[in-house]
Amino acid sequence: MTSIITGDIINSKKSSPKHWLEALKSVLNSFGKTPQTWEVYRGDSFQLEVTPEQALLTCLLIKATIKRFNDLDVRLAIGIGEKTYQSENITESNGSAFVNSGECFENLDKTTLAIKSSFEPFDTAINIMLDLAQLTINNWSSKSAILVKTTLENPDLKQNQIAEILNRTQGNISQGLKRAGYDEITKLLHYYQTQIQSLC
């Protein structure tokens, strides 16, 4: 079982790609090489393969990476399933994970993050949680996005160490994480992990 994330940048025409494209590629690169593991196509769309366990954390990392640029956001669809055909380019590979990701992406209406697998009760529960999480996530400021990204990438660091990296006070970090809903996001990630492990 694998997971395919399909995404595109919201408001990409309002911002020069040189601002966000390198940042996006840098995150995608941490999961493997292009074009087999990830690929950017049509200028502002991309596809990435990660393990099902990594999928939600990966989406939150991508979200935080793009939200640091004012006026930009990203739509993300997670498809979980099989990969039955492996091409040199991920966008030409196939299987139920790709189909689920594509269908989920096409059905993103007012939401910017959703999941589709062959386990309907799992999808329903997680998608309700994702809708609620987005009430906070979609409103991250640039500062919140940078803070969340740094904290997600360094889960073992204490707040005073994060403060040093970002040149802020520990009080700032604590307040910023509270505003960004970081504790609740951590609980969501933990719940997602336990559910995925019972499915895979």
Image: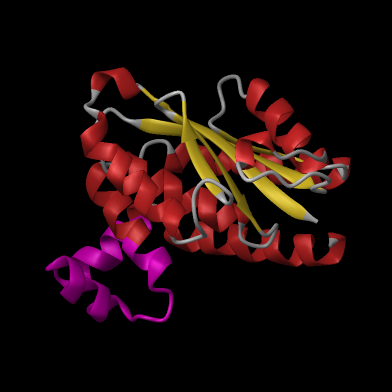
Q: Nearer the viewer, residue 140 or 50?
A: 50
Give how far across and how far down residue 195 sits, in percent: 78, 61
Residue 181 shows in the view: no
Which span is picked out in magenta? 150-178
Give how far across and how far down residue 22 sits, in percent: 29, 45
In the figure, is residue 51 to the left or right of 154?
A: right
Query: Where 4 falls versus 61 (above or below)?
Result: above
Image point 79% across, 67% down: which residue?
A: 197
In the figure, is residue 159 to the left or right of 108?
A: left
In the figure, is residue 118 to the left or right of 181?
A: right
Identify the image quadrant of the C terminus.
Answer: bottom right
Image point 63% across, 66% down: which residue?
A: 190
- In the image, is residue 94 part of the stretch drawn in magenta? no
Name the chief secondary structure element in magenta.
helix
Give how far across and how far down residue 81 sits, in percent: 81, 47
Q: Nearer the viewer, residue 89 or 22?
A: 89
Q: Nearer the viewer, residue 30 or 86?
A: 86
Give how far across and how far down residue 100 sits, in percent: 76, 35
In the figure, is residue 132 to the left or right of 177?
A: right
Image point 22% across, 37% down: which residue?
A: 19
Residue 166 shows in the view: yes
Image point 38% across, 73% down: which residue?
A: 154
- In the image, is residue 165 part of the stretch drawn in magenta? yes
As drawn, which residue projects farthest toward the front? 88
